Amino acid sequence: MSRGWDWESGQGLLGIDDPAEWERGESRLGTAAIGLALQCSLQQASPRIVRATQLPHAEQRGYAFTAAGTAARLHRELTPELYAVLRVEGPKGLAQDAINDTLTFVPFRRLPPWFKWRWVYATVRNKLEGSWLRSVDAVGDAWRAVRGRSS
């Protein structure tokens, strides 16, 4: 079994780009979920990505959430099961990047209510943080100008 993309044979990540092969119980399902997200339709990959998010090893779960974010980027939508898994994990856990990808690449009108609220929260927080940083920079510039004149 290959450990990456084989350009000649077309085999995907870990050689598990066929959903039927997934059911054999490969040892790196979280990593393989990324390959499925890249190679399969959302309907084929979704149940396997959801399954990989339940793995006991945190690193493999992280890869599964990366696969969910990849699916959001590629398909501009997610299945209700993937939305549910992301919501349960929450924005502070392993799903943080996947949630950000979902909010970035899935159109607002296609988001479920929790994700719409999350989008509004993130947008307002980012605007306030940007304003705060600009004001801190302005104060710092003014302070440096005053110190430069008085020296």
Image (spheres, rainbow, N blue to C red):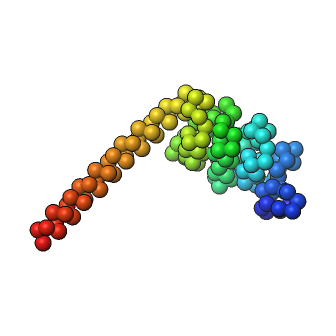
Instruction: Classify residue 106 by image quadrant.
Output: top right
Residue at 79 percent of width and 44 percent of height: 40
Residue 3: x percent and y percent?
Answer: 79, 62
Residue 61 visible in the current orientation: no
Residue 132: x percent and y percent?
Answer: 32, 48
Residue at 69 percent of width and 44 percent of height: 74
77 left or right of 116? Answer: right
Q: Nearer the viewer, residue 56 or 44?
A: 44
Residue at 24 percent of width and 60 percent of height: 141
Q: How many marks?
A: 0
Instruction: Classify residue 101 by image quadrant.
Output: top right
Instruction: Classify residue 42 by image quadrant.
Output: top right
Residue 107: x percent and y percent?
Answer: 59, 34
Q: Is residue 89 above or below residue 135?
A: above
Residue 106 visible in the current orientation: yes
73 left or right of 46? Answer: left
Q: Is residue 7 above or below residue 151?
A: above
39 left or right of 90? Answer: right
Look at the image and tell me in which quarter the N terminus lies. bottom right
Residue at 63 percent of width and 35 percent of height: 83
Look at the image and tell me in which quarter the C terminus lies. bottom left
Q: Nearer the viewer, residue 81 or 39?
A: 39
Q: Residue furthest bottom?
A: 151
Q: Is residue 122 above or below residue 142?
A: above
3 left or right of 67? Answer: right
Q: Nearer the viewer, residue 138 or 62?
A: 138
Q: Is residue 109 above or below residue 2?
A: above
Residue 2: x percent and y percent?
Answer: 83, 62
